[in-house]
Amino acid sequence: MADLTTHLGRLTLKNPLIAAPAEHMIHDGGVRAAIAAGAGAVVVKSTNESTAARAQLCAAEYVALNDRWEVVDWGPQADPATMILSRSGLHPLSFDAWLAACVEQDRAARDADCLLVPSLILADLDQAVQMARAVQQAGFRVLEFNIGTPYAREAAPGAVSTETAADRVALLTRTICAAVDIPVWIKLTGQTSDVPDLARAARDAGAEAVIVAGRLLGLLPDLETQAPVIGTSGGFGGFWNLPLTCHWLALCRAALGPGPNLIGINGITNGPDVARALLAGASAVGMASAVMLRGFGVIGDSLDWLDGYCTRKECSVAQLVGRAADARRTFADMPDLDAHWTRFVPPEST
Ligand SMILES: Cc1cc2nc3c(=O)[nH]c(=O)nc-3n(C[C@H](O)[C@H](O)[C@H](O)COP(=O)(O)O)c2cc1C
């Protein structure tokens, strides 16, 4: 068995796989299944004080899409290239009931050497501060603060946030970190041209880890109805996001330095993808929709694969972190390849 332990700030996880939040992390059974599957950490479905954000769950919609943009059946049989278009809402319970459920789940997590992570999504900052204090008071070891949902423009005004300015990220992070002593993980949007700028702002303001990065929005016209599939724009994700996430991770590692403070998320669908995100600079890796689509077996399968890979490469997870990012060069560093490009165009073009 390879050494899969990893560090995130002052925390140590038994392995780098974080079961990330989506609808399969609403009910107790899902959280416990992720713990039982061996995840190093489990992030519960997020909450905030907004009734509109909670109500949105009742109007949530999800479709699995193939590579011809056709809707396919939801489930583990779906092709590995399946993509997901969705609009979501927040945890249906009140904050107090959500917190009480998390406390119970944290007991099960501790028994399995798993880190249970309560997750807040920004609506009103003063309310977020109160909720963050309550999370700490309840005995949790960490807090995730998501300020980068895909949906701020689409949802009811003020229900959720998509923060794209570094000074706002700094203010929000500093405010929450000043309110609690436990480590705070800041989940950032990918809907920006400069994720490393936001990551640096969050780290400098006290975040112990930054989660890189939230999904993009997409709109898919249906050729028959000539209306958008699911009726709205939606969060759009899938396997294709993996290199985009790895690129942001590598740039964030360059901007922040090699400390254990990056969590990769978006497009990680299996064990090889977990290893790729580690190589790109993540110290831990979130996986959400692959598990929601295919079930909790994805977690154990991914960990088994990662264990085999580390054994074959004779290295620990900690040693994998950032290897590809640190080997990354600029275009200007590349050698002259002598008309190499002519091999990549149709014959008429040469
Ligand atoms: C249906 C759905 C619901 C989600 N709900 C939450 C949530 O409550 N809190 C949160 O921080 N992220 C939420 N996310 C985002 C995921 O945690 C993750 O960041 C994103 O889906 C990209 O990772 P993936 O490619 O592994 O799915 C949700 C994603 C989906 C698809």
Image: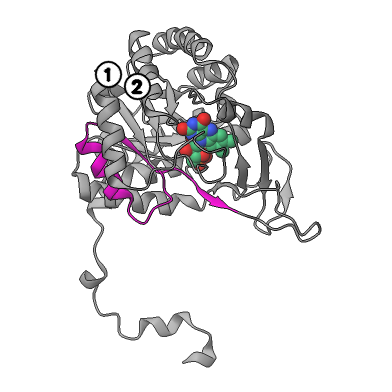
| Number of residues whose C-alpha sits closer than 10 Å to that of mark 2, classed few (under 14), some (14–19) or many (20 or more) | many
Expressed as whole percent of the image width and height from the top left, the position of residue 102 reads: 47, 13
Assign a secondary structure to mark 1: loop
Which numbered marker is on residue 129? 2
Is 27 colored magenta in this rendering? no
Which numbered marker is on residue 180? 1
Expressed as whole percent of the image width and height from the top left, the position of residue 40 reads: 39, 24
- Can residue 74 be seen by looking at this rendering? yes
Determine whether 224 is above or below 100 in the image.
below
Outermost residue on the right side: it is 224
Is 192 colored magenta in this rendering? yes
Question: Residue drawn at (39%, 53%), measured in percent from left and top?
Answer: 192
Instruction: Say which amino acid is labelled 2.
Output: Val
The N terminus: image quadrant: top left
How far is mark 1 from mark 2, CA to CA?
Answer: 9 Å
Is disc 2's CB within 8 Å of ligand 1?
Answer: no
Determine whether 224 is above or below 9 in the image.
below
- Can residue 115 be seen by looking at this rendering? no
Assign a secondary structure to mark 2: helix
Magenta part of the protein: which range? 189-218
The answer to whether residue 157 is left or right of residue 228 is left
